[in-house]
Amino acid sequence: MNQSLAHIALVVRDYDEAIRFYTETLHFTLIEDTVLSDTKRWVLVAPPGSTGTNLLLAKAVGEEQGSRVGNQAGGRVFLFLYTDNLQRDYTEMKQRGVRFVREPVKEAWGTVAVFADLYGNLWDLIERN
């Protein structure tokens, strides 16, 4: 058996503001933006150099989904972004206005910092040893 994760749905308030954050602030690549209906789009973004799983930006529909925007994991770190140079990315991301909720810390397995996306979802930025 050969399986892999293709997409992770991230509930967003607005397609265009989410695309701007991920492409302009985090420098992700916009892989696809296809209009499916008057209210629905298929929007995929991925970190630079990524060849695996990407994010499906899914616009919240209704009160229940809207209540999940920014808190999909109940306040825990939700997503994990590996980097080959944490200090470089940390510095650049801070200059572009990314809010870090935990500064870089060296651990036995590498270095990690925690940042919030535009809605407040928490991400680990990780450079492995």
Image (cartoon, rainbow, N blue to C red):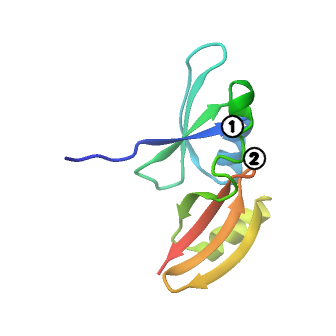
Is residue 125 visible in the rendered structure shown here? yes
What amino acid type is highlighted by mark number 2? Answer: Tyr
From the viewer's perspective, tell me whether residue 33 is left or right of residue 17: left
Report x, y in % for residue 126.
56, 70
Q: Measuring 23% from the left and 47% from the top, which residue is drawn there?
A: 2
Q: Residues within 10 Å of mark 2 (few under 14, many from 20)?
A: some
The residue labelled by disc 1 is: 12
Cα distance between the residues tagged 1 and 2: 8 Å
Q: Nearer the viewer, residue 77 or 116?
A: 77
Vertical relation: 11 (above or below) 120: above
Who comes first in sequence, dot 1 or dot 2? 1
Cβ–Cβ below 8 Å for labels 1 and 2? yes
From the viewer's perspective, tell me whether residue 46 is left or right of residue 64: left
What amino acid type is highlighted by mark number 1? Answer: Val
Report x, y in % for residue 78.
60, 55
Vertical relation: 119 (above or below) 58: below
Report x, y in % for residue 82.
52, 65
Q: Measuring 69% from the left and 37% from the top, which residue is drawn there?
A: 12
Q: Residues within 10 Å of mark 1 (few under 14, many from 20)?
A: many
Q: Measuring 49% from the left and 45% from the top, which residue is drawn there?
A: 54
Report x, y in % for residue 37.
60, 14
The residue labelled by disc 2 is: 119
Question: Which secondary structure, mark 1?
Answer: strand
Vertical relation: 48 (above or below) 108: above
Question: Which secondary structure, mark 2?
Answer: loop
